[in-house]
Image: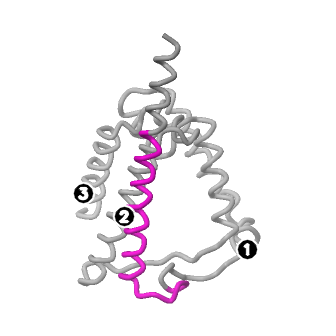
């Protein structure tokens, strides 16, 4: 029961942050898909960094045990394609679809129903997929620090520094795009 309460609490906090960052808005989603608005990229990269460090700290202190899933290229490629096509068609990713529905945007319900139908289709076809697509390119339970031959904390430090550089670059890029849009609006007047 405690696990369910933790899950519910963190889900509510995540939904609140999605809404406060305004990433559940369709125009933000469309801007991200067109590589014009990097708000969603920055939001998700922030959550990845915080969770990466947090999970490894919890593991370091023995409060959780990591359960690394195998890296299987077939599953990742097919899953990524399905995710990308769904996001492109609907304009919401799974997390933002739930947040948008919570805000009363009923168009996101189609995506949620599509996710449920996709989960059912996956469950029904799992025996076939298990012997074909889900075994192609199976690299086992590997991590990025193992592949790079680095200590996990050093690898995370490189990822954080690289991400901060990416944040800086995205901010500079967005400010240039906004100033060029503003300049073209003034020229149109």
Whole-percent x, y for residue 101 in the image: 41, 33
- Label 2 crowding class (10 Å Cα cut-off): few <14, some 14-19, many 20+? some
What residue does disc 1 label?
136
Any part of residue 97 in sight: no
Whole-percent x, y for residue 124 in the image: 67, 57
Residue 5, which numbered label? Answer: 3
Whole-percent x, y for residue 115 in the image: 56, 45
Residue at the (41%, 37%) spot, across then down: 24
Tell me the SS state at disc 1: loop
Q: Which secondary structure is most common in the magenta stretch?
A: helix
Whole-percent x, y for residue 162 in the image: 43, 67
What residue does disc 2 label?
49
Residue at the (58%, 35%) spot, across then down: 90
Q: Nearer the viewer, mark 3 or mark 1?
A: 1
Q: Nearer the viewer, mark 3 or mark 2?
A: 2
Residue at the (36%, 57%) spot, across then down: 47
The vertical placement of 11 against 161, above or below, is above
Within the magenta stretch, is there residue 169? Answer: yes
Task: Give left or right: position of 149 versus 58.
Answer: right
Q: Nearer the viewer, mark 1 or mark 2?
A: 2
The vertical placement of 185 against 170, above or below, is above
Q: Which residues are magenta?
A: 146-175
Any part of residue 65 in sight: yes
Within the magenta stretch, is there residue 17? Answer: no
């Amino acid at each position: 029961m405690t696990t369910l309460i933790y899950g519910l609490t963190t889900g509510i906090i995540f939904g609140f942050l999605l809404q406060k960052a305004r990433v559940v808005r369709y125009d933000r989603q469309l801007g991200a898909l067109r590589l014009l608005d990097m708000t969603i990229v920055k939001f998700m990269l922030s959550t990845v960094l915080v969770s990466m460090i947090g999970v490894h700290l919890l593991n370091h202190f023995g409060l959780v045990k990591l359960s690394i899933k195998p890296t299987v290229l077939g599953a990742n490629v097919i899953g990524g394609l399905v995710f990308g096509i769904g996001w492109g068609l609907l304009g919401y990713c799974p997390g933002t679809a739930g947040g948008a529905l919570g805000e009363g945007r009923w168009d996101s319900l189609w995506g949620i129903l599509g996710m449920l139908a996709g989960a059912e289709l996956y469950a029904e076809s799992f025996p076939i997929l298990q012997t074909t697509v889900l075994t192609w390119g199976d690299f086992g339970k590997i991590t990025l620090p193992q592949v790079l031959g680095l200590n996990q904390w050093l690898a995370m430090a490189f990822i954080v520094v690289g991400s901060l550089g990416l944040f800086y670059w995205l901010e500079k890029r967005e400010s240039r795009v906004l100033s060029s849009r503003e300049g073209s609006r003034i020229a149109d007047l």
